[in-house]
Amino acid sequence: MGIEAASELNASAGAYDDDDAASLNINSKLVNPFVGKTHGEMDDLIHRFMEKTKIESIYEEHIRKGAYLAQDNAAFEDVREDGLQLKPDERDALIMEDPKRGNKWNQPWIMYALVGCCSLGAAVQGWDEVRDGLLPSLCLDEPANEEA
């Protein structure tokens, strides 16, 4: 999936193309371009996105779920008319990402290792910059050459 295709999907979702959309709050439209879209409009956007990016059809269900979740966090709280449902492991993953219900410290160990490595790198860079900044001010005048 290309960046151009994703930005085009967002741009087309955020366009004011009818009178009802013009009445939406501009700030909410900037934050979430899918606000106010009907089920049919969302399906059309998803279908055009799939055609443009040539993503295999086996991923269509995942993209549809992601688009509806992007539109509304509570999109899967109730039974949906289109039959699209989250699997139990997908629900658990969404709960873990929720700042109110999830545990923000429950992350893969590799992420903590990456944070530790980056922190060490930043400390070494800081030491190097301090040394480069202090070294010229600590150097004494060079001793005079004594020629005999």
Image (spheres, helix red, strand yellow):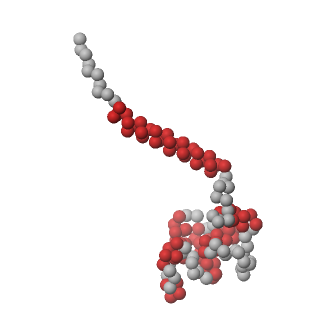
Q: Is residue 27 above or below residue 130?
A: below
Residues 141 and 75: in front is 141
Q: Quadrant of residue 77?
A: bottom right
Residue 110 picture location, percent across and down: 64, 49
Residues 9 and 70: in front is 70
Q: Residue at x 70, y 74 (%)?
A: 76
Q: Quadrant of residue 51?
A: bottom right
Q: Residue at x 23, y 11 (%)?
A: 148
In the rendered image, the residue lying farthest to the right is: 88
Residues 56 and 125: in front is 125
Q: Is residue 114 above or below residue 41?
A: above
Q: Quadrant of residue 139?
A: top left
Q: Residue at x 67, y 71 (%)?
A: 65
Q: Is residue 29 above or below residue 105?
A: below
Residue 146 picture location, percent across and down: 25, 16
Residue 132 picture location, percent across and down: 39, 37
- Is residue 58 visible from the viewing direction of this image? yes
Q: Is residue 22 rendered to the left or right of residue 97?
A: left
In the rendered image, the residue lying farthest to the top is: 148
Residue 5 picture location, percent across and down: 54, 68
Q: Is residue 128 above or below residue 80?
A: above
In the rendered image, the residue lying farthest to the left is: 148
Q: Residue at x 52, y 72 (%)?
A: 31
In the rendered image, the residue lying farthest to the front is: 100
Q: Quadrant of the N terminus?
A: bottom right
Q: Is residue 21 rendered to the left or right of residue 141?
A: right
